[in-house]
Image (spheres, rainbow, N blue to C red):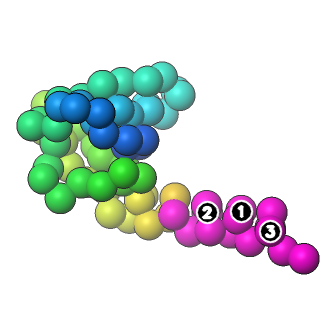
């Protein structure tokens, strides 16, 4: 099972980053339709799924980091 963070969409690809920080281009047709930038997807047995829990945790971490950076 591999995890990927969706950085952005370019043409027919989702530009992703794997857990090692490597850039990976995945065809949009191979991932669920309801995927958004910032989501974490899992490839299990050749099928991609959105990992809603990991996505939410990542978003919460980012929000906390932003609060720390911009607090006055």
First in residue order: circle 3 vs circle 1: 1
Residue 70: image tag: 3
Residue bearing mark 2:
61
Residues at circles 2 and 1 in contact by the CB criterion of under 8 Å:
yes
Q: Cα distance, mark 2 to mark 1?
A: 6 Å
Q: In this view, does 32 lie above or below 47?
A: below
How crowded pointer 2 is (Cα within 10 Å; few <14, some 14-19, many 20+) is rated as: few
How far across and how far down the image is residue 5, in percent?
Answer: 41, 42
Q: Does the magenta stretch include residue 71?
A: yes
Asked which secondary structure carries label 1, the reply is helix
How far across and how far down the image is residue 62, in percent?
Answer: 61, 61
How crowded pointer 1 is (Cα within 10 Å; few <14, some 14-19, many 20+) is rated as: few
Looking at the rendering, the stretch of residues picked out in magenta corresponds to: 59-72
**Residue that lies at the very extreme toward the bottom in this rendered image:** 72
Residue 7 image-quadrant placement? top left
Q: Main secondary structure of the magenta part?
A: helix
**Residue that lies at the very extreme toward the left in this rendered image:** 29
**Residue that lies at the very extreme toward the right in this rendered image:** 72
Q: Cα distance, mark 2 to mark 3?
A: 14 Å
């Amino acid at each position: 099972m591999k995890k990927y963070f969706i950085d952005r969409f370019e043409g027919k690809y989702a530009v992703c980053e794997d857990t090692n920080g490597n850039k990976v281009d995945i065809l949009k047709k191979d991932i669920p339709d309801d995927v958004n930038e910032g989501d974490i997807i899992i490839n299990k047995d050749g099928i991609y799924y959105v990992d809603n829990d990991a996505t939410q945790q990542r978003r919460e971490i980012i929000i906390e980091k932003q609060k720390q950076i911009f607090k006055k």
